[in-house]
Image (cartoon, rainbow, N blue to C red):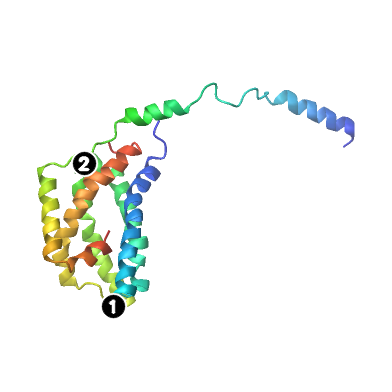
Amino acid sequence: MNSHDDQQLRSLLKRSLPPVDNVEPRRDLWPDMLRRIHARGHRAVRFDLLDWILAGLVAASVLAFPALIPGILYHL
Amino acid sequence: MNSHPYIKTYMAGVVLPSLFLLVVLLGFIVARFIFEAPIPIERMIIFPMAVVPNLWGLWNVLYIAVVGKRRLPLGAWGALLPALLIPGGLALQEFVGASLFTPIEGLVVFPVIAAVYYLIWKHAIGFFNSLVGVGI
């Protein structure tokens, strides 16, 4: 393959591949991302009565039987 | 577009036990090396370090993929996980020749762990799932 072939190959490649003009986005995308995160409306953590009762029972069990603590920690 | 929902779901399930592992590890290290409690931590740490987080991730994927479509609440699904974990922990104890709790103690502690799991899965895992855009 001589230099003439090289040049021809180069020009063929240039013609077949579309030019890449601007790889940067036209505008800053981060504000959109932030808007999306906030608009999604994550599930708010809200305890209902059953949750409070369960939390109270767990706390009472742990206070009454501290020996339970390693067993509980081991499974978390 | 919500791409790779199961990977996101797995990650949402894994994040909390992975974070909490630091607390558990610290607790066991303090108990073992400062208070000299007879806990063979080096043989048992594999369970909270590897088994628990992975099971949480897989349990969450199973919920999103199959169970959640049948309208079982996430908290209730999470509360079932100790039914697998406690026998698993007991089996591992047997396997490594250690003893942190007996089967009877496992039975006694089951409702407490199930209640803790219910609350964590309902609120924390539900929150993480909604954060990654699955299971809302």
Q: Please give the residue where the numbered disc 1 appears in the rendered image.
A: B38
The label shown at residue B70 is: 2
Helix, strand or loop at label 2? It is helix
**Closer to us: mark 2 or mark 1?**
1
Crowd rating for badge 2 (residues with CA inside 10 Å; few <14, some 14–19, many 20+): few
Helix, strand or loop at label 1? It is loop
Residue B2 position within the rendered picture, expressed as x and y whole percent measured from the top left: 39, 34
Question: Nearer the N terminus, badge 2 or badge 1?
Answer: 1
In the image, is A32 to the left or to the right of B81?
A: right
Q: Is residue A65 among the parts visible in the rendering?
A: yes
Residue B56's place in the image compared with B123, above or below, is: below
Amino acid on which disc 2 is placed: Arg
Amino acid on which disc 1 is placed: Pro
Residue A19 position within the rendered picture, expressed as x and y whole percent measured from the top left: 68, 23
Residue furthest out toward the front = B34
Q: Is residue B134 among the parts visible in the rendering?
A: no
Q: Residue at x 74, y 26 (%)?
A: A14
Crowd rating for badge 1 (residues with CA inside 10 Å; few <14, some 14–19, many 20+): few
In the image, is B36 to the left or to the right of A33?
A: left
> Mark 1 belongs to which subunit?
B
Q: Residue at x 89, y 35 (%)?
A: A2
In the image, is A63 to the left or to the right of A11?
A: left
Q: Residue at x 52, y 22 (%)?
A: A27
Q: Quadrant of the C terminus of chain B?
A: top left
Q: Quadrant of residue B106?
A: bottom left
What is the total number of numbered labels drawn onto the structure image?
2
In the image, is B106 to the left or to the right of A20?
A: left
Q: Quadrant of the N terminus of chain B?
A: top left
The label shown at residue B136 is: none
Q: Residue at x 33, y 70 (%)?
A: B44
C-alpha span from label 2 to label 1: 45 Å
